[in-house]
Image (cartoon, rainbow, N blue to C red):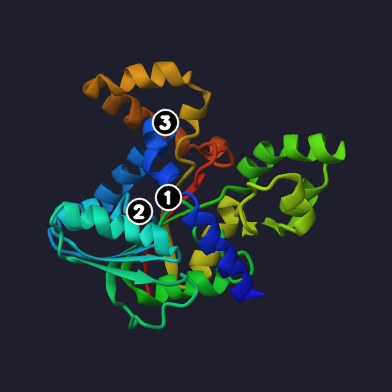
């Protein structure tokens, strides 16, 4: 079962390299989401100049490559060979040498010793794709972290609002939503793939309190929780594009969006088609 799921994940992300490379360019809401994650990363790094960082599920290097370029020692881990190849090529073109590329799944980090990394990143939902092993994967991420973890996962309420049309279109009533609401997990069957071939492999979406509880259970103190990109999902994309052209206005917008997205009343929403729940935690054991 696990090998089959990992094979599906490799194929799914191998096929999406080009789309991921252009995603922020094509959708300003994704640009906002990424920039909000960067604000949290920079907040955690502070004035540190040379941290050891694991980017677990790093894709084509959206975060790992700029962090290496800034002088940090980075391990870029991903399950997709083609994502890794794209990241290597980008890194090489930038003349970056302080980054190591590793193919693997985040639920098995046995190649790394305990407390190996000052900062562990797991962004844009790789933890959610460990649908049947997310607790083990979270334990591994915590084990290899020396201090801080920044995790971005699927937001349960958000994916339900995005999935309701699928159920009504294909079944005329709530169906897959029932299991997601009760358990957070969607098992993507052959029937579902026939109905929508572009469906992601099976996943688990988290509630904010669920994520916080798992981290605390594993010896971490949660410092911040937000639903990044919530406000941007309600903004006209053309207005967002205009906003991106005014650096001062855009920074002011991001500052307010951070405040809004952290409000307890909106934590269940999140950005469309992105990791809609962001949690920063500090290891205390």
Quick check: can you spot residue 58?
A: no
Report whether 30 appears left or right of 53. right
State the residue at coordinates (60%, 54%): 206
Disc 3 to disc 1, C-alpha distance: 14 Å
Residue 219 rendering spot, x and y as whole percentages:
45, 72
Q: According to the image, label 2 marks what residue?
A: 60
Give the number of marks.
3
Q: Earlier in the sequence, mark 3 or mark 2?
A: 3
Q: According to the image, label 3 marks what residue?
A: 26
State the residue at coordinates (25%, 19%): 246
Q: Nearer the viewer, residue 44 or 272?
A: 272
Q: Is residue 168 above or below residue 181?
A: above
Q: Looking at the figure, which quarter contains the C terminus?
A: bottom left
Report whether 144 appears left or right of 168. left
Residue 144 rendering spot, x and y as whole percentages:
36, 75
Residue 64 rendering spot, x and y as whole percentages:
28, 56
Q: According to the image, label 1 marks what residue?
A: 17
Most extreme residue toward the right is 172
Q: Nearer the viewer, residue 214 or 110?
A: 110
Q: Earlier in the sequence, mark 1 or mark 2?
A: 1
Q: Where on the picture, by quarter, is residue 120?
A: bottom left
Secondary structure of the residue carrying tag 3 is helix
Q: Earlier in the sequence, mark 3 or mark 1?
A: 1
Disc 3 to disc 2, C-alpha distance: 16 Å
Look at the numbered discs 1 and 2 and tell me whether their residues touch, using CB distance below 8 Å.
yes
Residue 130 rendering spot, x and y as whole percentages:
57, 66
Q: Nearer the viewer, residue 284 or 48?
A: 48
Secondary structure of the residue carrying tag 1 is helix
Disc 1 to disc 2, C-alpha distance: 7 Å
Q: Nearer the viewer, residue 249 or 162?
A: 162
């Amino acid at each position: 079962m696990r090998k089959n799921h990992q094979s599906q994940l490799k194929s799914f992300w191998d096929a999406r390299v080009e789309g991921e490379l252009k995603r922020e360019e094509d959708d300003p809401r994704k640009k906002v989401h990424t920039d909000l994650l960067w604000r949290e990363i920079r907040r955690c790094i502070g004035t540190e100049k040379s941290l050891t960082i694991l980017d677990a599920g790093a894709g084509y290097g959206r975060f790992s490559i700029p962090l290496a370029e800034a002088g940090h020692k980075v391990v870029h881990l991903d399950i997709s060979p083609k994502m890794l190849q794209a990241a290597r090529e980008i890194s090489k073109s930038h003349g970056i040498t302080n980054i190591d590329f590793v193919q693997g799944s985040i639920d098995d980090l046995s190649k790394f010793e305990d407390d190996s990394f000052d900062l562990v990143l797991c962004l844009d939902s790789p933890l959610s794709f460990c649908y049947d092993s997310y607790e083990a994967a979270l334990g591994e991420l915590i084990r290899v972290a020396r201090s801080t973890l920044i995790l971005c996962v699927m937001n349960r309420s958000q994916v339900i609002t995005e999935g309701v049309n699928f159920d009504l279109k294909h079944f005329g009533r709530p169906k897959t939503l029932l299991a997601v609401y009760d358990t957070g997990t969607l098992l993507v069957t052959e029937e579902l793939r026939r109905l929508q071939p572009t469906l992601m492999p099976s996943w688990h979406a988290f509630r904010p309190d669920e994520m916080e509880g798992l981290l605390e259970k594993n010896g971490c103190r949660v410092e911040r929780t937000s639903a990044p990109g919530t406000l941007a999902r309600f903004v006209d994309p053309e207005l967002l594009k205009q906003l991106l052209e005014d650096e001062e206005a855009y920074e002011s917008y991001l500052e307010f969006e951070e405040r809004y997205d952290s409000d307890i009343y909106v934590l269940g929403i999140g950005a469309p088609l992105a990791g809609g729940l962001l949690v920063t935690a500090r290891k205390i054991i």
